[in-house]
Amino acid sequence: MRTNGVNHLALVCRDMAETCRFYTEVLDMPLVKTVALPDGGQHFFFDCGGGSLLAFFWWENAPPAAPGVASVEHFPTKPMTAVGSMNHVAFNVDEAVLEDYLARLVAAGVPATPVVVNHDDSPMGAAREKHPGVFVRSVYFTDPNGIMMEFAALTRTFTPNDVRHAPAAATAPCLERTA
């Protein structure tokens, strides 16, 4: 099976008006579709670029957030989430805009990493400075619902040498790719 990318990712928010303000005014993602659900809920879609959408459901009686279970409790100290949960959403951006986007998030009062994170293959998984081994640079932040987000900029093309770890408690055939 071959897909053409992600159509939309559907999340749940605590307040649709607050969520709309954040995604349209802070992240500049146009609201492109709204749906009133038969049970009184709402389902809204935001254009996050590249032909993909980010959608939110809202129900007045939705269960409360569960940080540390269904969402990240605190990044980077407590990034683990439960099986079947969503850890975070990463938006692809150009590397040249990362510093500016971080400054805009901070100016808007959005909780964010204090610096751009340089992900590499070191034991810590990140470096203070950008170097040839850095494969992605990121800014992490949370939306008003406590959902962890990321602006991510790949710094190089992945090669077969980037797939060098066997999956834990799984079989190796998933590493074999078919053209």
Image (spheres, rainbow, N blue to C red):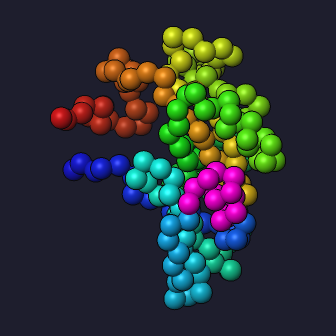
- Dividing the image into 4 quarters, which one contains the C terminus? top left
Tell me if 66 is positioned left or right of 86 in this view: right
What is the magenta range?
A: 19-30
Percent position (x, y) of residue 50? 42, 48
Tell me if 149 is positioned left or right of 64 in this view: left
Q: Nearer the viewer, residue 95 or 12?
A: 95
Q: Say which residue appears at 51% left-offset and 13% top-offset.
A: 133
Q: Of helix, strand and loop, which mostly describes the magenta segment?
A: helix
Q: In which quarter of the image is residue 70?
A: bottom right
Q: Is residue 52 above or below residue 103?
A: below
Q: Quadrant of residue 164?
A: top left
Q: In this view, does 161 lie above or below 102?
A: above
Q: Say which residue appears at 59% left-offset and 39% top-offset.
A: 151
Q: Which of 78 and 40 is in front in this view?
A: 40
Q: Is residue 136 visible?
A: yes
Q: Can residue 69 be seen in this view?
A: no
Percent position (x, y) of residue 161? 35, 17
Q: Say which residue appears at 40% left-offset and 32% top-offset.
A: 167
Tell me if 106 is positioned left or right of 131 in this view: right
Q: Does the magenta stretch include residue 151?
A: no
Percent position (x, y) of residue 24? 64, 59
Q: Is residue 141 above or below residue 96?
A: below
Q: Which of 161 and 57 is in front in this view?
A: 57
Percent position (x, y) of residue 175? 30, 31
Q: Say which residue appears at 60% left-offset and 15% top-offset.
A: 130
